[in-house]
Image (cartoon, rainbow, N blue to C red):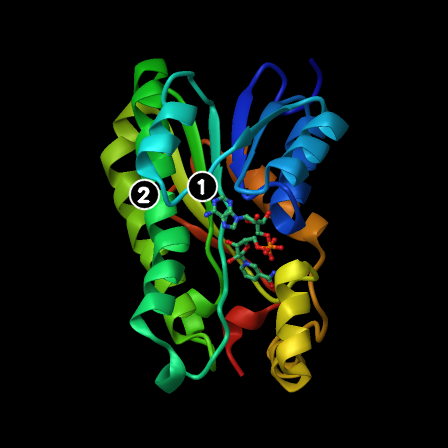
Amino acid sequence: MNGRFGGRRAVVTGAATGIGAAIARRLADEGAHVVVADIDAQGAGEIAREIGGTAVKLDVTDPAAVHAALGGEPFDVLVNNAGIDDWGWFTDVTPQRWRRLLAVNVEGTFACTQAVLPGMQRAGYGRIVTVSSEAGRIGSKGDAVYAAAKAAVIGFTKSIARENARFGITANCVAPGPTETPMVQSIREKDGKVLAAMIAGTQLNRLGTTGEIAAGVAFLAAPEASYVTAETLGVSGGMGLGA
Ligand SMILES: NC(=O)c1ccc[n+]([C@@H]2O[C@H](COP(=O)([O-])OP(=O)(O)OC[C@H]3O[C@@H](n4cnc5c(N)ncnc54)[C@H](O)[C@@H]3O)[C@@H](O)[C@H]2O)c1
């Protein structure tokens, strides 16, 4: 196999569409065998067929199912990408809504990481990349719980990096800015002004593409990123500077 990921096995969660699908394509293009894991079985199947990978129907909020699906086989790369947003002013957010948001974005990351770590530790090698968000670093109007969830995975990642350095495992985050995906399309439909404000918050004054985010993830997931751990790489058109 050619490419940076030749002979490597990777699992990408939430890979049926959007950023996750772009990551799966990118890793496969560079030689990885990719497990396309998503709650959307049909979408996962389509991407897996396209890239010659394996589809797994997986709800990351179900730890037992995650362990059953990912715990048995060794992976070189885990990309925790599955995530949901639920835009709304915080005064309107119910406990039910915030629990769902935390369950997918935070607990899903815990479950997938816990499922693959023992195999990586035995192998003495691993790359864990978690898709956070600039919202987790600078906050975001109408996205308070989402921002909290994305900050949580950054703290989690730094701790996993500390615990697992001795096993040759790195753990890093990518913090995308607003990126053209179905998630952003739903924000556009709810309130176009909110999306315009997000775009204005970037220095490059545009949405990112899924391919641009995938390139950042691939860098951190590659064997050569061996001296990079506990970092959060902004792929956000300069949004991390703040307004
Ligand atoms: N699009 C953006 O502007 C943006 C910006 C910053 C961060 N992000 C983050 O990037 C990641 C991908 O976002 P996207 O825009 O591609 O989203 P998307 O909504 O387009 O795709 C998300 C994917 O995750 C899957 N998914 C949702 N819940 C799941 C669950 N419980 N188990 C398994 N899979 C599940 C969906 O089926 C879908 O395929 C998310 O973590 C998101 O928070 C996105």
Res 199 quadrant in image: bottom right
Q: Nearer the viewer, residue 158 or 89?
A: 89
Q: Is residue 220 left or right of residue 94?
A: right
Q: How many marks?
A: 2
Q: Which residue position holds label 1?
A: 59
Q: Which residue position holds label 2?
A: 110
Q: Mark 1 or mark 2: name the one nearer the start of the chain.
A: 1
Task: Bin the neighbour count of mark 1 within 10 Å (Cα to Cα): few under 14, some 14-19, many 20 and up.
Answer: some
Q: Is residue 192 left or right of residue 110?
A: right
Provide residue 58's location: percent of width, then percent of height: 48, 36
Label 2 near ligand 1 (CB < 8 Å): no
Provide residue 21's location: percent of width, then percent of height: 66, 42
Q: Amino acid at mark 2?
A: Phe
Q: Cβ–Cβ below 8 Å for labels 1 and 2?
A: no
Regarding residue 224, the answer to whether it shows in the image is: no
Q: Nearer the viewer, residue 59 or 158?
A: 59
**Element under disc 2:** helix
Q: Amino acid at mark 1?
A: Asp
Please, which residue is most extreme toward the left here? 163
Label 1 near ligand 1 (CB < 8 Å): yes
Provide residue 17's location: percent of width, then percent of height: 66, 47
Locate the C terminus and report the quarter of the image it occupies.
bottom right
Question: Disc 1 versus disc 2: distance between alpha carbons?
Answer: 13 Å
Task: Bin the neighbour count of mark 2 within 10 Å (Cα to Cα): few under 14, some 14-19, many 20 and up.
Answer: some
Q: Is residue 135 left or right of residue 20?
A: left
Nearer to us of marks 1 and 2 is: 1
Look at 66% across and 51% down and name the residue there. 18
Residue 44, numbered label: none
Res 12 quadrant in image: top right
